[in-house]
Amino acid sequence: MELFNKINPHYESINKILNNLTVPNNEKKIKILIDGFPFYGIHSIINNLLKNKSISIEVECKISNDILYEIKNHHYDIIISPVDIDVDHKSIQKINLKTEILGLVFHKELMKKSMSVEKMMSNEILIQTKSSFEHCTMIEFLKEIKKIGINFKTLTINELDLLHSLENKTGYSFMTEEYFNKKSNPDLVFKKEPFNFFLNRRAYLLKESNIEIY
């Protein structure tokens, strides 16, 4: 739907719009849990689901405590996570999603001050949401960064304020290339070198649900 191409990928905004679009009491409700790291691909999934006019959709962004349990017990209909679980011979379907490229996003003035990515990371503040800092992939990335001698300060922030903080040169952030490409500020830079980090996520759902996400 065209509507979703015009809004920022913030899950609170998505839910407000969905609530206005899907009101009937006899509709099917689909609950989606996203692993905590910003995921722009949610728009394609929502657009496809909304081809069925008789459903409502709720999107939540946090870390799953137990993917198989939460799917089997209908806490969520779809869980999107980097965790790779063996679901052979079980009632749960696993769909591998498109590999995402992760990079640093920062105001170009920060690089002029530090002259290198490594120095900038040490001098400035790493800004992420709470759920991003708790994300298993982010935890591993930060371990690797510390191994090469980069020490960093951190700031935990609400996702709605993240872009504004980057525009104000408060610090830098990790995000996916697709997520960054939807932003329009020419002063913000996406840089994947020197780390070349990738994020592989899966969608988990019940086989019997007959939900098609693509």
Image (cartoon, rainbow, N blue to C red):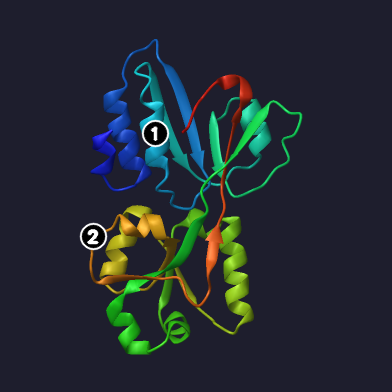
**Which residue lies at the image location 53% right of the left edge and 70% below the top edge?**
196
Count of marks placed on residues: 2
Q: Nearer the viewer, residue 51 or 77?
A: 51
Residue at 34%, 60% in the rendered image: 162
Quadrant housing the N terminus = top left
From the viewer's perspective, is 209 left or right of 90? left
Would you place residue 103 above or below residue 181 in this image? below
Neighbour tally class for label 1: few under 14, some 14-19, many 20 plus, Cα within 10 Å: many
Q: Is residue 126 above or below residue 100?
A: below
On screen, residue 70 versus residue 133, left or right, reads right
Q: Earlier in the sequence, mark 2 or mark 1?
A: 1
Tell whether label 1 touches label 2 (CB within 8 Å): no
Q: Is residue 85 left or right of residue 79?
A: right
- Give the residue number, with chain letter if any, for mark 2: 184
Q: CA distance from mark 2 to mark 1?
A: 23 Å
Amino acid under disc 1: Ile
In the foreground, 125 or 38: 38
Q: Which residue is situated farthest in the top direction here?
A: 26
Q: Which numbered tag is attached to residue 46? A: 1
176 relative to 27, above or below:
below
Pinpoint residue 201: horizontal percent, then vertical percent: 56, 48
